[in-house]
Amino acid sequence: MFERYLTQIAFAKLFPDGQRKLMQTTVGIVGVGGTGSHISDLIVRMGFGKVKIVDHDTVEISNLNRQSLYDEYDIGRPKVLAAYEKLIKINREVKIIPINKKVTEENVDEILGDVDIIMDGTDSFGARGLLNRFSIEREKIFIFSAVEGSAGMAKAIIPKKTACLECIGYPTYGDSVPCSVNGLIPNVVEMAAAISVTLAVKSLLDYVEDEIVVFDSWDLSLEKVKTKINPSCKICGHRK
């Protein structure tokens, strides 16, 4: 069973119980576009036990330069179905559940109520705000990430232990500016995905500090900025 994961198990911080923890963990990936498709690929390759991929969109030709799970034959197809077909060929040991829906206030608990970690592959402030609130209310790890141009940021949000998006002043309502307007270099989504999956693994193994990671794939820069829970935060500040 572990032969597939020999190289990552050999990494001291994962050996040997870390891999067992991954295999017992359920991950919900909301959005399988640019960042989300790369996150899905890494999560499945690393052998997390169960993975829910959630998206309501279809594949477009403009997606193909940065969304790693799709090719020209997938254009017009639901993303979650095309993604499922690719991912199941990568690792059949992982239980992969495609959900062709948009996550809303009404269905978020039905879709994500049984997951341990929520991974952010969304592209709107409102969607991230919903996931942020839900993760705090249900005490689930939430890995936030966002990209624009060549820059991005990522943060592990752990209820009762770290600041949430509301604490740090990140917008949690409305739509963000489409990447077709401000532009997006494809390699920044891979960088965001790699950092996000690292934060997910570290969160499971209790290695995460309260900080936000800010990076730029053009400048080849990365900075970690300390954050802390705002006692007055309406989402998490009053929680003990």
Image (cartoon, rainbow, N blue to C red):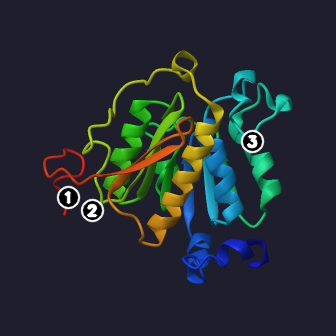
Q: To which residue does mark 3 refer?
A: 69
Q: To which residue does mark 1 refer?
A: 239
Q: Residue furthest left?
A: 232
Within 10 Å of disc 2 (Cα), the crowding (few <14, some 14-19, many 20+) is: some
Q: Nearer the viewer, mark 1 or mark 2?
A: 2
Quick one: label 3 or label 2, which is nearer the N terminus? Answer: 3
Find out whether the residues at labels 1 and 2 contact each other: C-beta distance under 8 Å: yes
- At 86% from the left and 30% from the top, the residue drawn is 73
Task: Classify 201 as above or below 130.
Answer: below
Q: To which residue does mark 2 refer?
A: 160
Residue 182 appears left or right of 7: left
Find out whether the residues at labels 1 and 3 contact each other: C-beta distance under 8 Å: no
Q: Nearer the viewer, residue 133 or 152?
A: 152
**Label 3's element?**
loop
Q: Residue furthest bottom?
A: 16
Task: Classify 176 as above or below 132.
Answer: above
**Label 1's element?**
loop
Within 10 Å of disc 3 (Cα), the crowding (few <14, some 14-19, many 20+) is: many
Find out whether the residues at labels 3 and 2 contact each other: C-beta distance under 8 Å: no
Q: Nearer the viewer, residue 78 or 191?
A: 191
Q: Nearer the viewer, mark 1 or mark 3?
A: 3
Q: Residue furthest right?
A: 73
Label 3 and label 2: CA atoms lie apart by: 35 Å
Residue type, label 3? Leu
Where is residue 84? Give x, y as percent.
74, 47
Quick one: label 1 or label 3, which is nearer the N terminus? Answer: 3
Residue type, label 1? Arg
Label 1 and label 2: CA atoms lie apart by: 7 Å
